[in-house]
Image (spheres, helix red, strand yellow):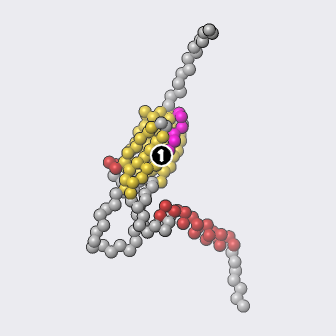
Amino acid sequence: MTLLSLNPVKEFENLTHNLQRYFDDFPTFGNHFNTEFSPRIDITEKDGDLRVEAEIPGVKKDDLKITVKDNVLTIEGEKKREEEKKEKNYYRIERSYGLFSRSFVLPENVDANNVEAKFEDGVLIVDLKKALPKKIEEKEIKVK
């Protein structure tokens, strides 16, 4: 009779690692001909100003469109696939390609007219400034 040592913590770590791996690949789960592309986004705030950073490797600046309408920031673009070369034997294709669009509702205090964007080294950075507070003037209301 052989005794096996069981380490429940290690077994749980293996299970969570495997689950995380499946969820990380969820957009392509079971799809060997992946055509979906969705950039990873970070949104941070400092002193009321927002910064949106999007990882968009392999996309050209001219293939991006950034809009702000009705307090919604939208980042659209296309990651184009290079032409498949007939002399290559493909064993595995994991890179994603295609059109993408991500939209985010902005807080009310963001000035839609004061937005700056820059794109370098595959990272898009969109800075949104907070709006200046509106002055509330005292106004006397006549009773009728």
123 to 30, vertically: above or below: above
Q: Residue at x 50, y 66 (%)?
A: 29
Q: Main secondary structure of the magenta part?
A: loop
117 to 111, vertically: above or below: below
Among the 4 quarters of the image, the one containing residue 116: top left
Among the 4 quarters of the image, the one containing residue 14: bottom right
Q: Residue at x 46, y 42 (%)?
A: 73
Reading the image, the residue beneath label 1 is 103
Tell me the amino acid under the disc marked 1. Answer: Ser
Label 1 neighbourhood size at 10 Å, few (<14), some (14-19), many (20+)?
Answer: few
Front in this rendered view, residue 12 or 92? 92
Left-right relation of 94 to 2: left
Residue 107 is covered by the magenta coloring: yes
Where residue 34 sits: x, y (%)?
42, 64
From this viewpoint, is residue 91 visible?
Answer: yes
Among the 4 quarters of the image, the one containing residue 91: bottom left
Residue 128 is covered by the magenta coloring: no
Residue farthest to the front, as pictured: 144
Where residue 11 sits: x, y (%)?
65, 72
Q: Which residues are magenta?
A: 104-109
Where residue 144 sits: x, y (%)?
62, 8
31 to 129, vertically: above or below: below
